[in-house]
Image (spheres, rainbow, N blue to C red):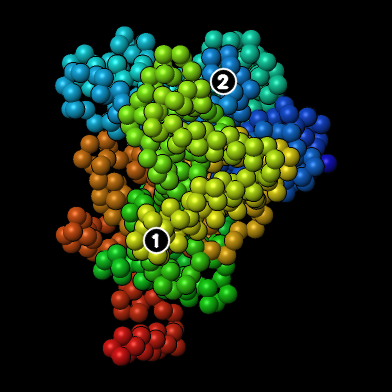
Amino acid sequence: MISLAGLNDKQREAAETIDGPVLILAGAGSGKTRTLTYRIAHMVDNLHIPGKSILAVSFTNKAAKEMKERVITLLGKQKSRGMTLATFHSLGLKILKKEITHLGYHKNFSIYDQTDQLSIIREGLRLYHDNKGAFKKEIIASKIGKLKNEGIKPEDFADSPFFDGEDPYDHAVNFMYEFYQDKLKFYNAIDFDDILLLTVRLFDENPELAREYSEQFRYIMVDEYQDTNPLQFRLIRHLTCAHDNLCVVGDDDQAIYSFRGADISNIIGFERDYSRAKVVKLEQNYRSVSPILKLANSVIKENKDRRDKTLWSDKPSDMKPILWELADTDHEAEIVVEDIVSHQSKGGHLGDIAILYRSNTQAAPIEEQLRLSQVPYTIIGGQKFYEKKEVKDIMAYLQVIRNPADQMALRRVLNVPSRGIGIRTLEKFLEESEAHEIDLFSAMKKSPELAGSREEKIKNFVKLIENTKNYFDKYSLSEAITNLIEDLKYFEYIDKCYDQAKQASRRKDDIHFFIESAARFTENFKESATLSKFLEKLMLQDSQDSRDDDEEDDDVRKNEVTLMTLHSSKGLEFKQVYMIGVEEELLPHKRTIINNEGDAEERRLCYVGITRAQEKLIMTVCKERKIYGNMLPRHRSRFIVTDDAKRFYQEQDRQNFGHLESQEEVDKYKKDFFSGLMNLLD
Ligand code: ATP
Ligand code: MG
């Protein structure tokens, strides 16, 4: 029996209301996610509801993973089996893997990322004659993405309210969208946005299938509901067609994804969409000490049109949040890292610390300083691991093996390493493939003689691919990949590509890391560690994942500082938080100021950042910052200069040792500082 004693009365009420719609609408740190995890444990352990009837959806892989860990802590591994704890994308993918044939794709489909998308669009633009060359591929791609997220099909665009007949871009998109979707289908590929779009279409066109899934997932929960977009909403509608056992939790003050199509009216209108909904409001914040919470409240209360909430904490603390005004970004990095080092030297755990920023570019000086001071850290987001060229090369080989129709992958690997197969040869096979409606690889295999003097080369390439395929049948993932890399002489190729040994060695490390992650994957999933599953896992990585996010991480946080954007920090908590660059033009972001978008969403983002901190919050502002090469004066964010907000933080002067608590510390600081200076002068 799981005891619900770890919940307060209202939380318990929400956890025990299993039948019918439930909405938990409450502020940050009030235990929404905790309530969901207890609710799941209660259903399984006390009500004996089979795990396979339970579906819980989180916003990011990291959040889904945290939820899984919390459930395992409550129930143990054995009893946690069978339930689906997923993100919207991983859920969609899971459904598509089983059902995509209903939509005319094969089961071994590939998932394309932005680079692949852009090459298809480049191809299409060559065919689109109007104002040739005047269109930016990126803009077309993003417009197509938006339409997909709104659920608009290519054939419906021109008649939809989104089409502006005066806008040449819309005419181009009208052509390109269809071209692009046709190509994807021909390559048996889908893009990231398609995952949700196709899942919803699948259910639109096959209501009986939606019913089947709805009957299977009798109990559905959605965390961070305030950030669902229209497609996600429709997916949830389908999955609740056979019942209305839906529990959603969220906070309208933390809606920060409207720029990506998230629609706050989903949470506001929940009681309209699901009548007889039980609404639970939570008011006690268990996360932060009260001075931090007071600051958060004073920042968010300036937003108009919000549901008024009273959020309180009974965790006293005599330390207010701190604001440091620093000279520039180097100084900022120095002081922040110095503070972290001092925390560490007092026996503090680095896993308790997060550095949060509005924009990824703010991370570089901090990273450099952390490296200099040998402080271990992990950075979340930034370039995704699988987007690195070398990793992508190897992955493209794996894609070809899994899905020979994947023309983008095939074209990528054809001359990597160089085989001297030129564009003219390629075109012959492309023609052959179109004429006979077969995929490119089959065309090469069937008629290598089309390559004329290059026939041998094509034959060798075909042989290489087929050999590699055998490796995957015979050996483990990591062994097969190692063999492939040897056959390709890929490391020699890397040496040739980079003049500097250091660069080459970093790329090789990436490949080694890739092989290791394949090995770990096999260890974790044993027999079910197939090539398909491995590729899917890599492609579903989102910007919230760190490079070595693993399925089976223990729940203990590693002893390293976490760096991430404010957006990525949603739902997480850390004892000590540094929010850097709380300045005008960063928070609110310059783009939102220029576009006159209003700052409600940016203010919510600021609120999300502040409410991540449990015990200690430090905000920084630089007096000057380099913008396009020029040092420009900076100002404190409008969010923290209101009279009310100012009452809830204290300013500390880091330049006059004002932050040091005792004379002893001041003396030591001065000594270290001067000996550092002497070293520099030596
Ligand atoms: P966010 O809006 O940031 O996602 P949340 O509402 O989901 O926050 P949780 O992450 O579930 O909040 O909880 C915040 C912290 O408070 C967690 O450490 C959680 O374990 C703790 N907590 C929540 N409720 C209780 C409770 N009743 N007793 C003790 N601790 C609690
Ligand atoms: Mg939460």
Q: Amino acid at mark 1?
A: Gln
Residue 321: x %, y % from top left: 42, 62
Horizontal relation, residue 523 to residue 636: left or right: right
- Picture quarter with the C terminus: bottom left
Which numbered circle lies on residue 503? Answer: 1
Circles 1, 2 touching at the beta carbon (< 8 Å): no
Q: Quadrant of residue 668?
A: bottom left
- On screen, residue 496 above or below 476: below
Q: Amino acid at mark 2?
A: His
Q: CA distance from mark 1 to mark 2?
A: 39 Å
- Can residue 288 be seen in this snapshot? no
- On screen, residue 49 above or below 201: below
Residue at image position (50%, 72%) is 343
Horizontal relation, residue 51 to residue 575: left or right: right
Question: Label 2 belongs to which residue?
Answer: 106
**Mark 1 sits near ligand 1, with its Cβ under 8 Å away:** no
Q: Please, which residue is most extreme toward the front here?
A: 453
Residue 382: x %, y % from top left: 41, 50
Horizontal relation, residue 460 to residue 174: left or right: right
Residue at image position (36%, 63%) is 500
- Can residue 220 be seen in this snapshot? yes
Residue at image position (46%, 35%) is 456
Residue 496: x %, y % from top left: 38, 56
Q: Residues within 10 Å of mark 2 (few under 14, many from 20)?
A: some
The tag earlier along the polypeptide, 1 or 2, is: 2
In depth, the one of 515 and 282 nearer the eye is: 515
SS assignment at label 1: helix
